[in-house]
Amino acid sequence: MSEPVSGNITNREAELISEALNLGGRNNSRSSEPKNDDLEAQMMALKVQLKDARTELEILHRNMPGGIMTYDADTGKILYVNEGLLNIFGCEEAEFRRHYMDSFSLFVMKDDRKRIRDFVDAQIQFFDQVELTYRVLNMVDEIQWLSHRATLIRHDDGSRTFFCILTDITEQKAIQNQLQSMNEQLYMETERFKLIEEAIDNIELDYDVDSDTLSVSMKDNKGIRHWKNVEHAFKSGHVYEIIHDDDVDVVESVFESAMKNPGKGAVEYRMPDSDGRYAWYRLNYASFDKNDRIIRIVGSAKDITEEKLEQERLRTEAERDGMTGLMNKTAMQLSVAAQLSKSDFNDCHALFMIDTDNFKSVNDTLGHGVGDDTIRFVADNIKNVFRDTDYIGRMGGDEFMVLMSHTTQDVVTERAKRLNDKIRSDVKSGNESVHISCSIGIAFFAKDGEDYDSLFRAADDALYEAKEAGKDCYRIYGAGA
């Protein structure tokens, strides 16, 4: 059994501490044996040195900040804990050992175990000292942060022991978290002013979630920037009152997303400018969280009206037939499909398929230049016969399509007769002429088809019937001759 050292430290503990801290030293070998009459004096001197070393170790043991633990480096079994460590957790040794089952692995909080194990395994391949921090669940299941400084001691019998000095750094961690929060606040402020600097002429916005206050910064006519606060901005819906009705759902959806996940994004919307006219704006924003809750959204809104007008011009060019100015085939198909998809089955829409009779003879006899003029003539008359709200498109060659939405069968037949009368004419060039007319096939939504493909097939079948009937007439799908 080990003898106590100065009442508290055993010889074995003193040996471990001495090995870890390199105290005490070893006797140097002598080249010759001491004389007999000096042996007793040397022994007394060694006893005094040993007593002094034990006293120093006892003082170090008692006054060392934190606590001491030793555990088997291979099995993880806890071998020794001192009073300082027990004081950190406010318990007796028996309770400590029972709670952590004498296992260093169970001592470390579960979420940190793999990280600690991997780090220690990597370190001891090259070093005998290990420094790390981890969390521990104490006796009342509260999290405590520990600083862990360990030395690996290798014994003559091949066993290995970690001698650890542990310090409670829970308060320091709390301070670090507070500093991190301050850094996050500083980061948000930096991002806010960075956005302002990058787009100084834009409208700047800063939304405080907790107070539901939106701060808006705009320049006046003199170029001076002013901030204005909008109280109860989103919760009362004040912001949505000035946004174009067609854009409210988009803005609301983006706002809800920004309130769920921190990050950056953009949204485009319309709102009145200083003259009361609707202008397009693109808002680039960033949202920030704290403790998994969004607390701030900052952004910069740029007037993109000119950009939108240019996009609309390019889109119109892409969707329009170059010769007639009508929608091209793709645009017409998409527009009709979209209108049908949002319609109720009780709505009455009529799809017209229109084919120019004898157009091939115009090209062959009068030339392609006259043929182009003929296509423009037919297109102009179709536009004159139908309403501005109707969809009109050139499907290619001499074929056209019209969708009359929200109409009646009487109106449809009247327009079909009028179009037949308008197109019926003689196309002349020099001494040559070709008689043209148009054949029309008509189908009704949702009686003849509930989507674009089915309604198109029905109208095309009706067009075939009109041609079979001798051209220059119209036929309604399923109505007979």
Image (tube, helix red, strand yellow):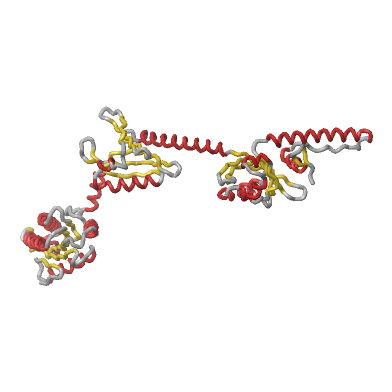
Q: Is residue 66 above or below residue 455?
A: above
Query: How many numbered tags mark residues here?
Result: 0
Name which quarter of the figure residue 480 lies in.
Answer: bottom left
Image x and y of residue 218, in percent:
29, 33
Nearer to me, 354 or 93 = 93
Q: Is residue 246 left or right of residue 127?
A: left
Q: Is residue 352 above or below residue 96?
A: below
Q: In this view, does 17 lie to the left or right of 262?
A: right
- Residue at the image point whose x is 75% and y is 36% from the top: 23
Can I make out residue 128 in this image?
A: no
Name which quarter of the figure residue 356 lies in.
Answer: bottom left
Q: Is residue 369 above or below residue 260?
A: below
Q: Is residue 71 left or right of residue 356?
A: right
- Residue at the image point whose x is 55% and y is 44% from the top: 142
Can I make out residue 55 in this image?
A: yes
- Residue at the image point whose x is 79% and y is 44% from the top: 2
Image x and y of residue 311, in percent:
26, 46
Image x and y of residue 216, in percent:
31, 35
Q: In which quarter of the image is the C terminus?
A: bottom left
Image x and y of residue 354, in percent:
14, 63
Nearer to me, 420 or 88 = 88
